[in-house]
Amino acid sequence: AIKKRLEKVEISLARARSETRKHQQKYRKAEQQAQKSKTLERKIVELKKAKVAMIKKQKESAARHREYTESKTREIMALKRKERTAGQKVSKLEAEIKIHKNNLEKRKDYSIKLSSKLKQTESHLMKLLAMRKKEL
């Protein structure tokens, strides 16, 4: 009877040891899973930070691009205004040149007429002088 009991106790002890080993294995697996979980959580936090940084960079880049575009647009508008002003100045100068050319042409014509009259008067005076000399 003691042998049977001893066998039962040994079997019970063996089962308990086996259960203990199983529990230890499960505990180790659970610890490994917890470590993996912590590692994954750290990675998630890092990825979220990287995402935030990337979004910030994208916004900064978009703002720089927008500012550059606006700057170039303002530059183009200024150049167009300058071109328009220069065109107006050119038109004004061309109009002045036309006026001056017309005035010059009128003076030229007037000068030619005066010169012609002067020659006629000189010729007439020479004839008169010649007639007086003949009379004297």
Image (tube, rainbow, N blue to C red):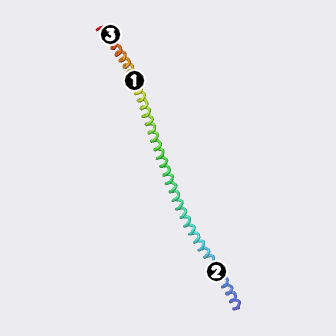
Residue matched to label 2: 21
In the rendered view, tell whether residue 70 sits above or below residue 1: above
Mark 1, Cα crowd under 10 Å, few <14 / some 14-19 / many 20+, is few
Q: Could you tell me how far apart the alpha carbons at marks 2 and 1 are, in whole angstroms? A: 127 Å
Residue matched to label 1: 108
Residue positioned 41% across, 27% down in the render: 101
At label 3, which amino acid type do we have? Met
Q: Could you tell me how far apart the alpha carbons at marks 2 and 3 are, in whole angstroms? A: 161 Å
Which of discs 2 and 3 lies nearer the camera? The answer is 3
At label 2, which amino acid type do we have? Arg
Q: Quadrant of the C terminus?
A: top left
At label 1, which amino acid type do we have? Lys
Q: Residue 7: name its quadrant.
A: bottom right
Q: Is residue 23 left or right of residue 101?
A: right
What is the x, y in percent for residue 97?
41, 29
Q: Is residue 13 left or right of residue 83?
A: right
Residue matched to label 3: 131
